[in-house]
Amino acid sequence: MEMKGIDNYNYEGKTVLLRVDINSPIDPKTKKIVSDNRIKKSLPVIRGLLEKKAKLVMMAHQGDTLDYENLIPLTEHAEKLSEYLGRRIRYIDDPCGPAAQEEIRKLQQGEGILLGNLRYLTEEISTFEDAVKLKPEEMERTWLVRSLLPLCDYYVNDAFSAAHRNAPSMVAFQRLLPTAAGPLMKQEIEALDQVMHHPNPPCVFVLGGAKISDAFGMMRQVLESGKADRILTCGITGEIMLMAEGYSLGEKKETFIRARGLDRFIEDAAKYRKQYPDRILYPSDLVYEKDGERICLSVKELPVSEMFMDIGEETICRYEKEIASAGTVFVNGPAGVYEKPCFEEGTRRIWKAIASTEGYTVIGGGDTVSAAQKYIDLNDINYVCTAGGAMVRYLSGMELPLIRAMRTAKGE
């Protein structure tokens, strides 16, 4: 996809409005950042614009209505940016009001400021997006755009991980200011396009975790397009596949699945298994805990009323062989509830196999990256995507709001 990069413009002495995604996991008790991966990934675009002598204004969000406990000021984010960049990044706890506007006017070339949490604004939260459904041209009347547009000369977006969000900070400024994509966005898209359009065969998708709507959205796309040679299912995705094959998991696990409405995916699972029987693998054994011990059960022994939370030894060995012979591996979601010692074996072994394969590897999603960090060196992965929801939607073939906006962005 053709997008102008930050090297296409001369920013010296100009005010650049930069949208980054530094939304970070927060400790629920201390309210401190527990993983600064996204902050570190944003450093190249910030450093690049400051070195080009821009007056840099940064917008970002933290938390949302759906995770209100993480909706906090960006004070620590600014402190970490300052530490890693080796220069001061000022912070003002105001996203676009009079105080923020005054600080922007004071900026000198080569200086940067991080504005207050965008989610302070109604027009930037997910519930507003879902309820009001503004078009980009209608967003020009929002307070954020009306407040910041007169003060800025250029707009840069390096927030691919929020590309699925139809919010003013993401899609409105492209119509109004000369626009560029940051280097991280280009890297993310290139890595995902490698998986989607130019995978080295055989291409293996490992789909686990609890967010099975993500898994099934991708599954349909990569099966119908022929991109996936194998899909290794685990976690609840694997259990849904078993139910689609006619296995009864037992009262405890099936009650858990039905209480969350996840049984609605059984029909899709059955359809995909019928259409692509050799391309979708599902667990042949599962693990539950009894008296603190890890108990492995063949699916031939089902149903058993236990809470299965990991894949068993036979399944792990089958999946390790598939990964070892893969030309491309994409991973979304852990194999089990790895946070509990009894159920970490599947996730640990799968990650070790992925880290040691010679194939091209891409991982993404918050839980996926957290699990990987626990068991392997992320440097052993070819590309670690900062995105979760945006990545899933992109791989599902959806046109993301940000990508659509960047395609029609204003030039100089």
Image (cartoon, helix red, strand yellow):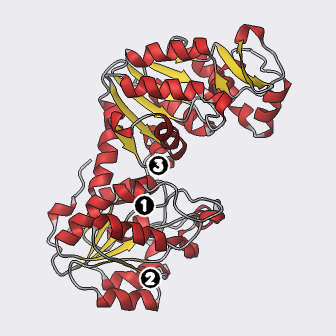
Q: Is residue 355 visible?
A: yes
Instruction: Bin the neighbour count of mark 3 within 10 Å (Cα to Cα): few under 14, some 14-19, many 20 and up.
Output: many
Instruction: Bin the neighbour count of mark 2 within 10 Å (Cα to Cα): few under 14, some 14-19, many 20 and up.
Output: some
Q: Which residue is at a point 31% across and 53% down the rendered structure image?
A: 184
Task: Of the two numbered discs 1 and 3 on the same chain, state the one appearing first in sequence.
Answer: 1
Residue nearest the observer in this picture, 246 or 292: 292
What amino acid type should be assigned to the residue bearing mark 2? Ile
Q: Which residue is at a point 29% across and 42% down the rendered structure image?
A: 190
Q: Position of residue 376 (x, y in %)?
A: 43, 34
Select label 2 or label 3 by which is in front. 2
What amino acid type should be assigned to the residue bearing mark 1? Asp
User: Which secondary structure lies at badge 2?
Assistant: loop
- Provide the residue designation for mark 3: 390
Residue nearest the observer in this picture, 227 or 56: 56
Q: Position of residue 12 (x, y in %)?
A: 15, 77
Answer with left or right where residue 121 lies relative to residue 29.
left
Task: Of the two numbered discs 1 and 2 on the same chain, state the one appearing first in sequence.
Answer: 1
Location of the C terminus by quadrant is bottom left
Mark 2 and mark 3: span between their CA atoms? 28 Å
- Provide the residue designation for mark 1: 21
Select label 1 or label 2 by which is in front. 2
Q: Is residue 36 above or below residue 315?
A: below
Q: Is residue 263 above or below residue 37?
A: above
What amino acid type should be assigned to the residue bearing mark 3? Ala
